[in-house]
Image (tube, rainbow, N blue to C red):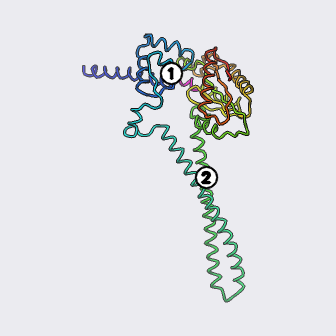
């Protein structure tokens, strides 16, 4: 009897965990922070799937559209900008730094270490060059001294010094080689920090750095925000592992078709493209050709050989204004993406 009674709360915990996971996915899909106000709204939607609120949310999100602030407030919810206050207050005392903070710290440490290694390598090379020159000069002096028999002792000491200098040169050469190897590994670590683990594409950090470093002389620049159509259905029907492979395949196809322009996985099923040296019309034409290539692919579940059907993406493309911050350009492209979704998906909307 005690075993049966002990099992009851465990079953309830599993149900709560499932709801908790669905709430987490809902917040992630709608780009909402884990603020208590957002959590309460998500709980109200997901805990009562037959309610009018849940039906209203489904009608909107079935179009692959995220809920806007106006949508949430119209449905009785409340949107809080930034991280949840309670989480911000307790982070230092409980959970410690966030994953983003830890990633930023790790990258900063890698950059600082690489700068120190670069400086050390330069010092080693300078010492090596100076030691080599000194060794040559000393060898010449020793050769001259050997012609004077009365200076045998000085010659012996000088020869000993030359041998030690040669040994130091060998050690410095080894230190230089080890330093170069370490620099290579640090460069690889920096690249890894800017690459999406799933798709192998550059990530959002790489996009932000490329956007900030763009050369005005290489312009004009355009930004495209792309989103896979009805991707949630792929995950729901075929599972997340199949969805991950679809994400990777489409991301790699986009990168190949858009080369040499930068294609990054910006998050979830969303990709961003930074196009240099193209007008808005040319950028839209390029994205439309990529869209056609992806739409022509026929994906299958390799475990069951079940066809996944046609998978497409929609995109919003906009011209980047001079000195425009990334957030402003991205917001404009995101709105154009919504317009493409609302007009039937599988299309490019430029503006």
Magenta-colored span: 238-244
Q: What residue sits 54% from the left and 44% below the top?
A: 107
| Magenta residue check for 277 | no
At 60% from the left and 25% from the top, the residue drawn is: 334
Front one among 45 and 145: 45
Q: Give the alpha-carbon distance from disc 1 to disc 2, as whole Å.
A: 51 Å
| Spot occupied by residue 227 in the image (x, y as percentages of width and height) | 61, 23
Decide which of tag 1 and tag 2 comes sooner along the chain: 1
Residue located beneath label 1 in the image: 69
- Residue at x-position 58% and y-position 48%: 186
Residue depicted at 71% across the width and 24% down the height: 284
Identify the image quadrant of the N terminus.
Answer: top left
Label 1 secondary element: helix
Label 1 crowd (10 A; few <14 / some 14-19 / many >=20): some
Measured as percent of width and height from the top left, residue 292 is found at 71, 20
Q: Is residue 108 above or below residue 196?
A: below
Circles 1 and 2: CB distance less than 8 Å? no
Badge 2: how crowded within 10 Å, few (<14), some, or many (20+)?
A: few
Name the residue tied to disc 2: 181
Most common secondary structure along the magenta stretch: helix
């Amino acid at each position: 009897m005690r075993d049966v009674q002990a099992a009851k709360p465990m079953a309830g915990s599993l149900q709560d965990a499932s709801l908790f996971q669905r709430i987490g996915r809902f917040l992630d899909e709608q780009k909402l922070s884990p603020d208590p106000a957002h959590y309460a709204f998500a709980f109200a939607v997901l805990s009562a799937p037959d309610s009018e609120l849940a039906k209203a949310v489904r009608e909107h999100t079935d179009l692959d559209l995220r809920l806007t602030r106006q949508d949430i407030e119209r449905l009785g919810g409340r949107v809080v900008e930034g991280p949840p206050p309670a989480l911000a207050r307790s982070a230092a005392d409980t959970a410690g730094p966030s994953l983003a903070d830890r990633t930023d710290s790790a990258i900063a440490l890698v950059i600082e270490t690489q700068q120190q290694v670069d400086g050390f390598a330069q010092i080693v090379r300078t010492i090596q060059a100076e030691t080599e020159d000194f060794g040559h000069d000393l060898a010449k002096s020793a050769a001259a001294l050997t012609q004077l028999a009365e200076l045998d002792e000085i010659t012996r000491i000088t020869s000993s010094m030359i041998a030690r200098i040669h040994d130091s040169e060998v050690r410095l050469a080894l230190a230089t080689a080890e330093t170069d190897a370490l620099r290579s590994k640090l460069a690889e670590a920096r690249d890894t920090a800017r690459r999406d683990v799933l798709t192998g594409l550059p990530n959002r950090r790489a996009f932000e750095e490329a956007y900030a470093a763009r050369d005005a002389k290489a312009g004009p620049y355009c930004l495209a925000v792309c989103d896979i159509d009805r991707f949630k259905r792929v995950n729901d029907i075929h599972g997340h592992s199949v969805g991950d492979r679809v994400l990777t395949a489409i991301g790699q196809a986009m990168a190949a078709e858009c080369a040499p322009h930068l294609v990054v996985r910006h998050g979830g099923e969303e990709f961003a493209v930074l196009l240099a040296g193209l007008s808005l019309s040319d950028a839209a034409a390029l994205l439309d050709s990529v869209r056609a290539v992806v739409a022509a692919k026929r994906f299958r579940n390799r475990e069951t050989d079940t066809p996944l059907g046609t998978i497409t993406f929609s995109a919003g493309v906009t011209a980047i204004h001079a000195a425009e911050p990334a957030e402003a350009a991205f917001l404009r492209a995101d709105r154009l993406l919504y317009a493409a979704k609302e007009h039937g998906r599988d299309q490019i909307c430029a503006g």
